[in-house]
């Protein structure tokens, strides 16, 4: 196990390096002069030159990259062009709201997805199955930002039960997390159904039935347990997509998270923040994939030796 | 019965693959309904200048925020513009973005995939590593990063959304290429000295097309949804444009006062994406019934 972990971690290193090069190159791909952007539109040529020197943009590229990596490793991501505050502070303030939002969204997704998936598989070919799968394909096709608006209209504008947006109490969490989780719930439902149907063909399920194990126990004990391995993998992989989805959902519900910070930063062309956020999101995805791989091996030792 | 197949998997099949595909596809009632809806939608988009009852950008300050009526089927917006007409014109934008971005992605992806699969070795591992990297990201994040570089706007959305279709098609084409590379006719072509480029274009590319077509439909759904999301958050089509996502963003201020502003554009996005997804499901099942539960 340890050697697998080390091998897998070493395999991640070049990917992280590639991402860092891409994020570093990002500023140089931008149209226009980054030093002028930082200095602002009214700056004189002298100001721009001073900014260029202070940012180290006059140095050769390889040297700039080394500086960038060393700054990043020390947690120095520069200053936001919009608020003039350190980027680390800007992101730090908004990180936890997004983390909580994705976690609660995943709770909805697993609860709804597993339920629909299992019911569809068990009632395969009957109306429950068709109904479940119609719900699933609709869930995949439903624009999440529209769902968010419809929910706000019903529960906030008309009924007045829930706040339209913002962050704070548990009431603030209900609609955003449900909206974000529903798309993943649909994916989970489809996936659970096929994993379940696959397992129903296995010998041990047939044996369990043959020796008279009650159907309920066959479903929840023999089948679901074994279906859990691929489902756990799926949960891990979908986390990345929840983080991506949160960018849009945070805009719908005025959620003070990193997703909204990213959209605002793109609109304001606040490059230091964009750069740091893209790097942060990328490293998160790489870590999630790594974690999924490790969990998978823990659950199924055969893979280790392949 | 007259077909002579070189593929051992085809033994026992008596119909031509294309006829068999159509026979199975025509049995998929849901997919046929979806196809009919999409054909109607495409026709409406093409004929928008002739069938839209009003000019989509002409303001009418005498008829602001009117609910649905006989004169305005989907009501009017804050400037008195006819929402039904705007949705028909919006179909042009969404369908164009969907088709163009997926075509670009398919072109790039299939090219890369065939090259990777055909040449193998380091080219293969380099291309596949890149695809793994791209696939690890949610599409919307990649798209936003691209827009951060290119700037907001609907044309840039096409490029931004195209990028995350590339790895999907590359993987697909690579898989088929690896199989076809060993086919007798490819060996024969190589033996008589046909150039690599010609082999890839003439003998391998056609074999990858069935899978590509299935994924094409599904990717269009996803791409339209992503493009609408980008416009909704203000990074795609800009306000006067009758883009569906932008219309939703415009209408959200009037929820509870004029619900039709958010109802109809949202419904348009949902039904269009649903149509492409259902069509894709049907095509996939018709292409390979074994995949149905997999």
Image (tube, coloured by chain):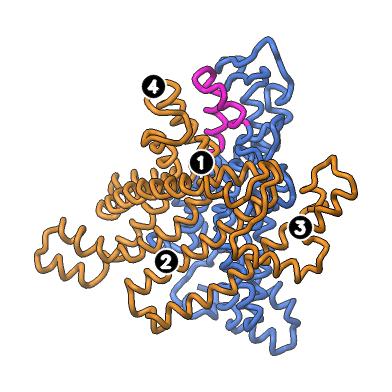
Chain colours: A orange, B blue
Q: Which residue is mark 1?
A: A249
Q: Distance between the Cα atoms at labels 3 and 2? A: 38 Å
Total label count? 4
Q: Is residue B225 visible?
A: yes
Which residue matches tag 4?
Answer: A159
Callout 2: chain = A
Q: Is residue B39 magenta?
A: no
Is residue B255 one of those drawn in magenta?
Answer: yes
For disc 2, the neighbor class at 10 Å (few under 14, some 14 to 19, many from 20) is some
Which one is earlier in the sequence, the residue at label 4 or at label 1?
A: 4
The residue that label 2 is drawn on is A292
Q: Which residues are magenta?
A: B247-271
Which mark is in front, 3 or 4? 3
Instruction: Identify the mark nearer the N-term, 3 or 4.
Output: 3
Q: Are marks 3 and 1 on the same chain?
A: yes
| Marks 3 and 2 in Cβ contact (< 8 Å) | no
Q: Residue A55: which disc?
A: 3
Residue depicted at 37% across the width and 33% down the height: A171
């Amino acid at each position: 196990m340890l050697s697998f972990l080390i091998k897998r971690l070493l395999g991640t290193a070049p990917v992280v390096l590639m991402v860092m090069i891409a994020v570093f190159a990002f500023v140089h791909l931008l149209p226009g002069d980054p030093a002028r952007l930082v200095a602002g539109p009214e700056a004189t040529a002298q100001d721009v030159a001073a900014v260029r020197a202070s940012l180290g943009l006059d140095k050769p590229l390889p040297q700039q990259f080394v500086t960038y990596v060393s700054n990043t490793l020390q947690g120095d991501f520069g200053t936001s062009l919009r608020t003039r505050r350190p980027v680390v502070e800007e992101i730090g303030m908004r990180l936890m709201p997004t983390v909580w939002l994705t976690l609660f969204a995943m709770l909805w997704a697993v609860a709804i997805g597993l339920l629909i998936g299992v019911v569809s598989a068990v009632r395969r070919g009957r109306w429950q199955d068709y109904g479940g799968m119609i719900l699933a394909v609709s869930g995949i096709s439903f624009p999440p930002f529209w769902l968010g608006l419809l929910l706000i209209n019903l529960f906030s504008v008309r009924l007045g039960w829930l706040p339209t947006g913002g962050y704070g109490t548990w009431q603030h969490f209900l609609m955003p997390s449900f909206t974000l989780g529903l798309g993943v719930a649909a994916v989970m439902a489809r996936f659970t159904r096929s994993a379940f149907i696959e397992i129903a063909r296995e010998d041990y399920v047939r044996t369990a039935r043959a020796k008279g194990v009650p159907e309920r126990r066959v479903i929840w004990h023999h089948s679901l347990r074994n279906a859990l391995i691929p489902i756990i993998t799926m949960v891990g992989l979908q986390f990345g997509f929840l983080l991506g989805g949160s960018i849009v959902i945070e805009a719908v519900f005025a959620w003070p998270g990193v997703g909204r910070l990213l959209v605002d930063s793109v609109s304001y062309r606040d490059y230091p923040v964009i750069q740091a956020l893209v790097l942060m999101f990328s490293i998160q995805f790489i870590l999630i994939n790594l974690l999924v791989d490790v969990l998978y091996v823990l659950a199924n030792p055969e893979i280790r030796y392949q | 019965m007259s077909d002579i197949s070189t593929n051992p998997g085809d033994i026992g099949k008596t119909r031509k693959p294309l006829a068999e595909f159509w026979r199975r596809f025509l049995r998929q009632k849901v997919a046929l309904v979806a196809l009919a809806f999409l054909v109607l939608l495409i026709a409406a988009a093409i004929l928008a200048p002739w069938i839209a009852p009003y000019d989509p950008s002409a303001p009418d300050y005498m008829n602001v925020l009117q609910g649905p009526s006989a004169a305005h089927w989907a009501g009017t917006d804050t400037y008195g513009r006819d929402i039904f007409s705007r949705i028909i014109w919006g179909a042009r934008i969404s369908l164009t973005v969907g088709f163009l971005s997926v075509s670009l992605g398919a072109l790039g992806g299939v090219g890369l995939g065939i090259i990777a699969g055909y040449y193998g070795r380091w080219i293969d591992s380099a291309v596949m590593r890149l695809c793994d990297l791209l696939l690890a990201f949610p599409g919307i994040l990649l798209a936003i990063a691209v827009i951060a570089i290119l700037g907001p706007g609907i044309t840039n959305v096409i490029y931004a959304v195209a990028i995350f279709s590339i790895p999907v098609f590359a993987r697909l084409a690579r898989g088929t290429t690896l199989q076809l590379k060993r086919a007798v006719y490819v060996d024969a072509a190589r033996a008589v000295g046909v150039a690599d480029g010609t082999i890839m274009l003439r003998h391998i590319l056609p074999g990858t097309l069935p899978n590509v077509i299935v994924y094409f439909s599904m990717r269009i759904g996803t791409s339209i949804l992503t493009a609408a999301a980008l416009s909704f958050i203000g990074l795609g089509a800009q306000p006067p444009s009758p883009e569906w996502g932008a219309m939703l963003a415009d209408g959200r201020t009037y929820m509870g006062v004029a619900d039709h502003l958010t109802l109809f554009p949202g419904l348009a996005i949902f039904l269009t994406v649903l149509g492409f997804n259902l069509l894709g499901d049907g095509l996939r099942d018709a292409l390979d019934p074994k995949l149905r539960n997999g």
